[in-house]
Amino acid sequence: MVATVGNHPLDNIEDVKDFYDAINRRHLTKALTPERPYTYWTIELYDKKNGIRGGGGLGVLAADTRRVAEQSSVPFVLITPFYPEEPHQHYEKSGDSFKNYTTHEKVDYTKYGYDFLNTVNIKANDTIVNLDVIEKNLGSTKIICITEPGFGELYSGESGSDHRLYQEVSLGFGGYLALKLAGLKPAIMQLNEVATFFAALARLDELTTNGMDFYEAVVYTRKHTLYTNHTLVQAAEAEFTYDQFNRFVFPNLKSPAVRKWLSDKFENGRIRLSTVTIEIAELRSGVSKLHARVANYRDLAGNKVKFRAITNGIDIPTWTAPGIVNYLSTKGIIDKFALPAEDYKEKVQAISANDIRTLKQKGRTELNTVLEHRPNQYGNYIKIPEDALLFQFKRRFVDYKRPWLAFTRPETLKRILEKHNAYFIFCGRVHEGDERMSRQLERLLKLVDADPFLRERVHYLPDYDEELGRALSIGANISINNPIVGLEACGTSWMKDIINLGLLVSTHDGGVADCPADSYLSISGETESEELDSLYARMEEAASAWENDFDLEFFIKKELENYLPIISGTRMLKDYLDYLF
Ligand SMILES: *Cc1c(COP(=O)(O)O)cnc(C)c1O
């Protein structure tokens, strides 16, 4: 029998047991209880349905991890700030140039179904700050937020600034108090990047203050803390000064021993949170096989830190067209937990080009519905013809992801689009204050504007968010992912494209490199010029595949055979649980 996937929490005990059997952890119900849950700490959550807009992959991952836990009935609490403001990006053409501006909107948590619990206090810069604690229950999971009107936006201020430290300290110390207020004890603390370090520090401080021997408390905290790293280079991380810690961190510590321990970790009056996070977390993970291997981190003794590879996954029901989820489960390819069935590789063989085309047609209609309220760079509303091919590039507009790459040889791009009756949509927000990337984007928009054909076929959609991300994965045929090899930790956007039966053209990097390079349309080359030859050749190949049933089936099956287990967020949660317990 085929059950629907993920539309409702599993409330039936047989289902829950099945899941635990499936993940081979029969004792898990004992390890995790509603009062002693898995706790997940993150400075960024990308979950607009629950009122919080993130910046990128880190936040999307946090939201997906919680959703998967909810569908699997795992007791799970996510602790994060609620930002009372969020930025929105706009584009307008004025004269010859494109005016890029940001508006800042207020966000009110009462509109998103949170309950106010109480306030907690932390000390910051010689004042006592009151933080509101709010909570929202979602099946076996909860989101607990701490907030106050002066919190500002996610990532406001420079990294290493007082304001960032204030946000991080609020999340750690305030969030730890919030947990207690909610009557919860963490069974495990997962730190989604080092900005959440202070949560583990707050725990160490509490254990020590409550009479546990300091070294025992360190061992206990270490054994129950998992640090998930998403960054490659330790040196790139911002530092804080002793003076900043004196104003924001030390006043929140009660234990002299913990204060001494932390003071000793400064070098020349400065500290990087990764060094202390490594000290306080015995469990450490990276977000793809390649990333775990190459992330270059040293502990205080100078030894290279080993990271367990737990490749990111996505919550399949959230990011996949419902018709496709239904199709994959009816064909027995995924089970009711959105895990690949044991024999999924055989079952994938039953996918036909005809089915792919029918499902993608529906996806195109859905995309066009979203495009009715999402203008392009001219402020115009576009519609992609049902019979046209669509390429898409959607990711944060940052250097290493090379959003400009496909525009390097405009004549080649034009020829491909003309030959295959194709359109190209790209999106991605420039980080506020990133002048270089802002100019880069303007250059691309001018390049498109200067050519009547490109102007009709190439569209930039401002204010990239979850809605656009999902709609493009569902409604486009070919996605382009071309980070400089070695710089993408995992990426999850490409997973959304594969699960929605799109063809992936990508460099061999991040989580894509978990499988061999012939699993998708791989961009290769030693130099950027060689990579460009390869990119355009792969775009041609992908476009031709959509014109040929045999090739289309071949590539789609190959992608699913290789990547389905990786894509499954349930598999990711299972990997975390296996590692933790
Ligand atoms: C999926 C998604 C991401 C993750 O993108 P990667 O660049 O692949 O890490 C970021 N932002 C949004 C809005 C998304 O939907």
Image (tube, rainbow, N blue to C red):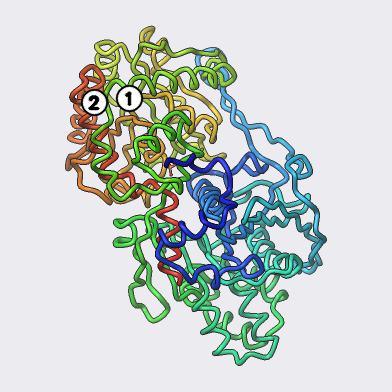
**Which label sits on residue 356?**
1
Task: Decide: few, some or many residues near mark 2? Use Cα within 10 Å; few <14, some 14-19, many ≥20.
Answer: many
Amino acid on which disc 1 is placed: Ile
The reply to whether the C-beta atoms of the residues labelled 2 and 1 are less than 8 Å apart is yes
Vertical order, 15 against 369 (above or below): below
Give the secondary structure at mark 2: helix
Query: Which label belongs to residue 49?
Result: none
Vertical order, 114 against 243 (above or below): above
**What residue is at 65 percent from the left and 86 percent from the top?**
208
The residue depicted at 63 percent of the width and 82 percent of the height is 259
Position of the N terminus by quadrant: top left
User: Mark 2 is on which residue type?
Assistant: Leu
Residue closest to the eye, 213 or 526: 213
Q: Quadrant of residue 423?
A: top left
Q: Is residue 104 left or right of residue 340?
A: right
Q: Position of residue 24 (x, y in %)?
A: 40, 65
- Residue 552: image tag: 2
